[in-house]
Image: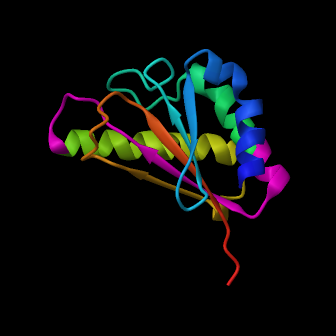
Amino acid sequence: MDERKKDLEKALAPQIDAGLVTVQILADHAILVTTTKESAFDPGSSVVSRGVIPTLRTIADVVKTYGKTTIAVIGHPDATGTVAERKALANQRAEAVRNMLLGMDVPPILLTASGNSNSNYLDGRVEIVVHPLVSG
């Protein structure tokens, strides 16, 4: 996964340099790509921001190139609204990103989406975790 992380960082360099995303490797060799407040969803919206579309294209291309990975999309809510509204919004955001990745030809079997309504991140961000498939 280190090679994939390097490839992702290289491909995402313009978005990283612009402060639109961060990339880090997790303990389980997964790669975490996180949108920032500059590329996050608008408050109360589940419409994918134009600022994050190049990032999604890059992730889709890398996943299709390497294969043997899965993607988990985690949506986060805004600071306002009821618990039920935050939960619905977080789920809608995750699903919107999942649908965009599906439209970029990422196979549905490789994608999951869920909202984190109890998140400490109440700024409309989305986290995209690219996991290596473990053969066993």
Q: Is residue 86 left or right of residue 96?
A: left
Between 29 and 112, the one nearer to me in the picture: 29
Q: Which residues are magenta?
A: 61-83
The residue at 25%/39% (across/down) is: 86
120 relative position to 63: left or right: left
Q: Residue furthest left?
A: 82
Residue nearest the observer in this picture, 23 or 50: 23
- Residue 99 shows up from this direction: yes
> What is the quadrant of residue 22 in the picture?
top right
Residue at left 33%, top 39%?
89
Residue drawn 29% across the image and 32% down it:
122
Question: For residue 83, what is the image quadrant?
Answer: top left
Up/down of 66 relative to 24, above or below: below
Q: Position of residue 133 (x, y in %)?
A: 68, 68
> Is residue 96 or residue 9 the one in the foreground?
9
The image shows residue 40 at horizontal and vertical percentages of: 46, 25
Q: Residue at x 48, y 17 (%)?
A: 38
Viewport quadrant of the N terminus = bottom right
